[in-house]
Image (cartoon, grey):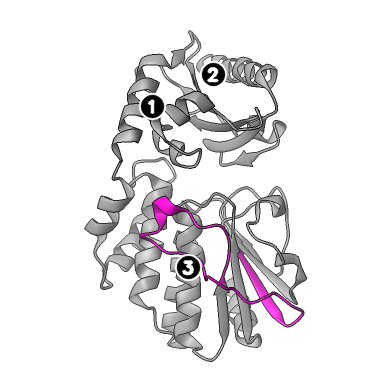
Amino acid sequence: MQMFQAIIQTIEQYSKIMIFRHERPDPDALGSQAGLAAWIRKQFPCKEVGTTGENEPSLSFLTTMDEQPFEVDAETLVIVCDTANMARIDGGGWDQGAAIIKIDHHPNEDPYGEPMWVDTKKSSTCEMITELVLYAQQSYGWAIPNETARLCYAGLIGDTGRFQFSNTTPNTMRMAAELLAFDFDPGAIYAEMYKNPESLVRLRGEVLKNFTLTEDGAAYMYLTQDMLNKYNVTINESSAVINSFADTEGVIAWVFFVEEEQGTYRVRFRSRGPVINQLAVKYHGGGHTMAAGAKAENMKEAEDIIQELETICRSWKQR
């Protein structure tokens, strides 16, 4: 309650508020950012409230950023959603404001902001935003717009994999139930979020034919620039195939190496049990215990990551 009050009181103090989130946004990042903006605008129509960052075309059905966001200055409150590390904040000027609020559910490897609300027990930042707006409704009489409910629901189902992942808790389901009381179409969200163009379906087929599974239960796949170009799939869009072989018997943890134009690799980790975020931290990344991201500078680092993931899986099996 004290944290909710601190955030609300800070929002009340400023007439200009700019809301940021992490680069290469997913539904939780966009949902928490734009859902929070819609909620603040509802309470304070006279405040100047902006959203900024790169647009993600595949998620434009959720929201797009302000076309001409105002510049952050010494009178602006900055709110950063769903972003553990300052280096991953998308957009310039976030460090030029009068104050920063951090709202995030990732491990707090890079503390910043005051108030700083970090809760790793929550499935998503959208679950946290839902708690905040429900508290404000009950304690302050602040209305919750349908758009905030729609966006938070999208982020919640995105980060829980439609309530299938282990981060889904009783509180997650309670928040989902609260959101479903509002006027939006959850079926339309599912239809758009899990709609796959033919190019992605065919890329998924290639992944299923060519991924490698080791004896220790570590699976891996390389997505090269040639493959992405062949199927006309962007690096961001390729994240949709990360769970293609997740249900394969024997897979304990898996990693995708997505080749970037400069020859480095974007690394995506997932796990069914072993903790893998510390491995991600070692390679310039981070994330949740069973879902994380990193970067490999070259093929040698990618091979080292595979070996270390095998060791993690082997140790986990021998517990």
| Nearer the camera: disc 2 or disc 1 | 1
In depth, the one of 82 and 18 nearer the eye is 18
Can residue 168 be seen here? The reply is no
Mark 1 vs mark 3, foreground winner is 3
| Labels 1 and 3 touching (C-beta < 8 A) | no
Image coords of residue 272 (percent x, y): 45, 29
Q: Residues within 10 Å of mark 1 (few under 14, many from 20)?
A: some
Q: Earlier in the sequence, mark 2 or mark 1?
A: 1
For mark 1, give the secondary structure.
loop
Q: Residue furthest top?
A: 215
Give residue 238's position: percent from left, percent from top: 45, 36
Considering the image in quadrants, where does the C terminus appear? Answer: top right
Mark sitting earlier along the chain (1/3) = 3
Work out whether 262 lies above or below 1: above
x, y (%) of residue 152? Answer: 40, 63
Identify the mark at residue 149; answer none if there is no mark: none
The stretch drawn in magenta includes residue 319: no
On whether residue 69 falls in the magenta region, the answer is yes
Q: Which segment did they paint magenta?
A: 51-80
CB within 8 Å, label 2 to label 3: no
- Quadrant in which residue 21 is drawn: bottom right
Dot label at residue 246: 1
Of 202 and 284, nearer the camera is 202
Residue at label 3? 34
Specify whether residue 29 is in view.
Answer: yes
Distance from Cα at disc 1 to Cα at disc 3: 31 Å
| Circle 2 residues within 10 Å: few <14, some 14–19, many ≥20 | many
Viewed as shown, does residue 268 lie left or right of 238? right
Picture residue at 59% right of the left edge, 73% below the top: 69
- The residue that label 2 is drawn on is 313
